Image (spheres, rainbow, N blue to C red):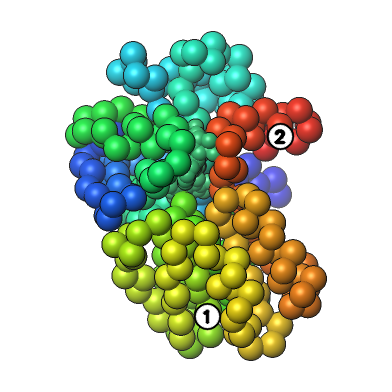
Amino acid sequence: MPTAAPADPYRFFDLHVLRSAPLGPSMVRVTFGGPALDAADDSGDAFVSAGRDQRFKLFLPHPHQDAPVMPATWSPGTWFADWRALDPAERGIMRSYTVRARRPGELDVDVALHPGGASGPAARWAAAARPGDRVVVLGPSGPDNGGYDFRPPPGAPVLIAGDLTALPAIAGNLAWLPAGTGARVWVEVPDAADRQDLPTEADAEISWVGPGGLLDAVRGAEMPGTSPYAWIAGEAAVVRALRRHLVNERGLDRRAVTFTGYWRRGATEEDLLAEVVADGAAR
Ligand SMILES: Cc1cc2nc3c(=O)[nH]c(=O)nc-3n(C[C@H](O)[C@H](O)[C@H](O)COP(=O)(O)OP(=O)(O)OC[C@H]3O[C@@H](n4cnc5c(N)ncnc54)[C@H](O)[C@@H]3O)c2cc1C
């Protein structure tokens, strides 16, 4: 018997800022809301996060606009081409972020402000975000959406390492881990005051590392048990070096290492996207 096609697990959500609050010197929490989030209008299914490192795309207006300019209609197969066909000086500025928390009517996103570094449009936007500011989110509308990568084998000890941009995902990963899982965690923060509480039922040892210290901290540490699963995210060159260390010097199976460059020093997310497109591998 034929079954109905599964609902598309991603779609555009028109949202607005409910409030924003600094979390420390280098990060701001922006809370979004809007009827689309809970499907309280007729725009489609609700925003559903799978937790862990659930990612989504945030579309922001340019400084001269009130709302991001987006393709007229949502189409799962063509949204990327439709968005790219728009004038780059006018189309919504697309950036990748992580769901920090999802509550009825609310979506929290924690945005790093690039302290001491070059600033980008998303960091600038977040620093100035005010209630009512409009955005569009390309987000999951089903828990089985594939937009998360933290998938430790059941029972395996876990190694997690990342910088401030990965802190929201690390918080989600730790909150998701089952009770008793052994976890060794390193988080690099620009300032000691950027540390956060990271609630977890896992048996986790969390180390906070200063600027530039992530690689050395992991290099100098004992691995959590035999055959750990590793999850690494942050600046691309640091992530690559960490992965190389874990695979080549610590002997981890490369399939047991999930690694993602969340940003690259000296490159905007447009630059990175252009490389992906040039490789013919846009997703
Ligand atoms: C799957 C995924 C999930 C992510 N989740 C989050 C998240 O939850 N929170 C978060 O803050 N970031 C997150 N990021 C990283 C974020 O998308 C990038 O930092 C992005 O480049 C920020 O956009 P921007 O407009 O501020 O800067 P861009 O215009 O992209 O870059 C401008 C300049 O700033 C530099 N830059 C970019 N990010 C940083 C940084 N963090 N510190 C110092 N310099 C920087 C760039 O190298 C460039 O020179 C995530 C990335 C991915 C791929």
Is residue 269 visible in the rendered image? The answer is no
Please tell me the numbered disc located at residue 170. none
Mark 2: give few (<14), some (14-19) or many (20+) Cα within 10 Å: few
Foreground residue, 103 or 206? 206
182 above or below 135? below
Query: Which type of secondary structure does the marked residue at label 2 adopt?
Result: helix
Distance (Cα) linking label 2 and label 1: 33 Å
Please tell me the numbered disc located at residue 276. 2
The residue at which mark 1 appears reads as: 183
For residue 28, side relative to residue 159 (left or right): left
Residue drawn at x 67%, y 37% is 283
Residue drawn at x 52%, y 80% is 183
Query: Which type of secondary structure does the marked residue at label 1 adopt?
Result: strand
For residue 90, side relative to residue 194 (left or right): right
> Could you tell me residue 46's position as x and y percent?
39, 44
Mark 1: give few (<14), some (14-19) or many (20+) Cα within 10 Å: many
Foreground residue, 209 or 120? 209
Q: Earlier in the sequence, mark 2 or mark 1?
A: 1
- Disc 1 under 8 Å from ligand 1? The reply is no
Q: Amino acid at mark 1?
A: Ala
> Could you tell me residue 74's position as x and y percent?
52, 25
Instruction: Kindly indicate the quadrant of the structure image that contains residue 228.
Output: bottom right
For residue 93, side relative to residue 198 (left or right): right
For residue 123, side relative to residue 236 (left or right): left
> Could you tell me residue 156's position as x and y percent?
63, 82
127 above or below 1? above
> Could you tell me residue 201's position as x and y percent?
41, 81
Residue drawn at x 71%, y 82% is 227
Instruction: Kindly indicate the quadrant of the structure image that contains residue 168.
Output: bottom left
Is residue 130 visible in the rendered image? The answer is yes
